[in-house]
Amino acid sequence: MEKFNHGRREAVYVITDHPILQFSRGRKVIFYHDGRPLEWYENDPIAVALYANNVKTLSYTKKYHRPRGFFCAIGKCSSCFMTVDGLANVRTCITPLKEGMKIETQHGLGTFFQSSSLPSEELRGLFGFKAEVLVVGGGPAGLSACLEALESGCRVTLVDESLRLGGQLVKQTHKFFGSSLDFAAVRGIKIAEILQQQLKQYVDSGQLKVLSNASAVAYYAKENVVLCEQGEKRLFIIEPEAIVVSTGAMEKLVPFVNNDLPGVYGAGAVQTLMNVYGVLPGKKVLMVGAGNIGLIVSYQLLQAGAEVAAIVEMAPKVGGYWVHAAKVRRLGVPILLRHTVKKVVGESCVEGAVIQEVNEKGELVGEEKFTDCDTVCLAVGLSPTVELFWQAGCEMVYVGDLGGFVPKRDHTLRTSNPRFWVAGDVAGIEEATTAMLEGRIAGLSVSRALNRLDEATFRSRLEGYWNKLNELRMGETSYRVRKGLSHVFLEQVPSLVQTDAGDEPQNQFGDEEFGSGVLSESMIETITPPMDLWKKKKGGLVIIECPQKIPCDPCHYSCPTGAIKAFENINDVPTIDYSKCTGCAMCVAACPGLACFVADISGEQAILKLPYEMMPRPQEGQDVVCLDRHGKEVVRTKIVKVQEPRKDKTYVVHVVVPKQLVMHVRAVRVIDRG
Amino acid sequence: MDEKIFVCRCEEVTLEEVRRYIQMGFTTFNELKRLLRIGMGPCQGRGCREIVLREISRATGLPVSQLNPGTFRPPSKPLLAGLFSIVESKKRS
């Protein structure tokens, strides 16, 4: 990190050195904020350019003149309106910065409107064109739908709101779970690159037309036209034969005092800022929500160099994968279960937050506690972005377990309006791996409807995709998705789809510590390697701390000796044949949950091989603090060896520790001498 | 700053207002929208709709799934009216 200090303004942090990411920044240009010249990189969003210059307040509201910043940072919430080159109400979170731009803090609705801001004549008027297949939204679902339809020979038009394709994938620095035959153990950012790579040939051949920074803002059913707006300055209409809507979702708001203050951001916005554009949202963050997003973003904040004050979660256990919770706990982040944020404190931006315990009914009880923080990150769930389906007259259903209203569909993801298909988070909040499969199904079904595929090919592929989906959804944390899915089909649940939810999974070690990502003592015994073998084994034996059934298999696929056995069901917890384990630590480097460790106790002192993805980059001889599962310092030692087995920036660091600590130390913090 | 809790960021409608109007008998989203402008701002209800429906549900005892979430009129974000201004002179291709 480098201090980015412009004259007398308070310094903010621009990330220059990140353990996973490299930021490819454009040309630095001068722009004007309320007449004051500032500098930032061309084509980054305006809101990011301002944030990097420590401008958090973008507008003042019309009624109470409250300061406002952005909230969703993906063009959905319109919280980031400013006046740009005389044009009011520009979404600055998705409008690229240009040299010499005049950006003004907007007061209320802005001033309508200066003649210079009128778009040029050639931009006006409704340009129209036809599309065989229109895909709205270029995230994992949309891109997969494009690919499937293109592979079948359809001509596709893709409309995407952002400046870069890939949806939320472009900000996912963590490795994905799921099947190694697909994208497991690959980072989200890499998956976005792979999908775009696969699409490139179709763009080159003209079979795929991509319209970026364009929003589909309306559908008129009678005329069958989708109205689109591009770059805030151009309108056009598309007449599609078939439409796949994969518009994703938006962060849910939480009603609390000062929930609109600059510094209260959706988790997606925080990710955009720090992982796409390399600007830290704050130095000390309170995370609200311990689902996968809250847990993953907390880890990413640590990677980017911020401090996470705490994660508060209303439920009595974390909602996300247990291994994600363990990752942040061992780095010292407290997870406060049955807690929520009561209010945010601050005048023009967040200066702290008051948190409080909640009881089983969700009522605030107990003592109010003040938490020092400059950012509050909301990760309490997402709402599907479904307006187009309502406008298309699709039959809708409210399913709380899926995030809100979603369109009903058949087993090919076609809605009750035969022109409309649905895929991804807008079909029900889930995650990117399943979104990609849903995109595939929608693209396949569209191809069949347009007669680009014969029935037999269609059938067999459809079955293949559903089999994968069903498998991925059998894990413990997908319980609510399965339950939700039983309500979304137009007819009865199709036989291809497994929604049998069974009873809600109970955790067998149901104490609070376990519920927030720390193994209980009794659990530790069950994962300790057999002592007779362990004592003799040079190189060590593997220890896997993965107690929850989740769909994931890279530990097995990365294991060169077959010690980590094949999974009968991808959701099973790993089983180990210790006699085959050589302690090679390939699994340590591959595991997306960072839940594999190797301990060698054959020598005088024990050697631990631990995964490491933080700054500063590890080097032999560095002094480190060893942390236990709670993030408490237990001993100080040195790194004796560093490996990067997969060349993917997950390092395996070898540290020497006293033997009695091998089942305690689970992370290291490099002592930064710089 | 005072202790307002905003349900609708765009139109600055508070939780207290929403509850008061629901108590007065306005128990549909569309009524509240017309009276309070809730959901009529630039985000078109993407942020507030669910919170409002939850409040209606709490007051009426009806589950959210049985409530009418209101009308979703196009467009879903503000557009420059000027962009439509010379439609007549252009032919659709």
Image: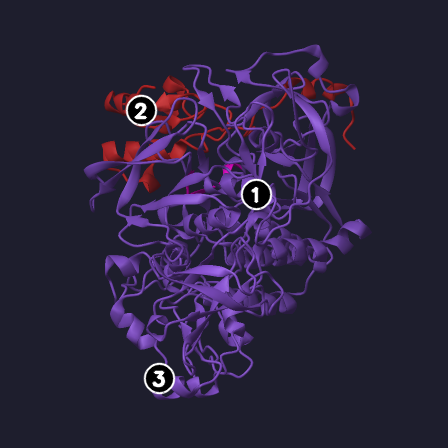
Chain colours: A purple, B red
Depth check: A108 or A658 in front?
Answer: A658
Disc 3: CA contacts within 10 A as few (<14), some (14-19) or many (>=20):
few
Chain for mark 3? A
Q: Is residue A380 magenta?
A: yes
Res A480 quadrant in image: bottom left
- Residue A550: percent from left, percent from top: 42, 65
Secondary structure of residue under mark 3: loop
Looking at the rendered structure, which numbered label has been put on residue B18? 2
Q: Which residues are magenta?
A: A377-387
Q: Is residue A209 magenta?
A: no
Chain for mark 2? B
Q: Residue at x 30, y 63 (%)?
A: A505
- Residue A366: percent from left, percent from top: 18, 39
Of badges 3 and 1, nearer the viewer stands 1
Of badges 2 and 1, nearer the viewer stands 1
Chain for mark 1? A
Residue type indicated by callout 2? Val
- Residue A405: percent from left, percent from top: 42, 42
Q: Residue at x 69, y 41 (%)?
A: A25
Residue at mark 3: A530
Residue at mark 1: A1
Q: Is residue A418 visible?
A: no
Residue found at the far left of this picture: A366
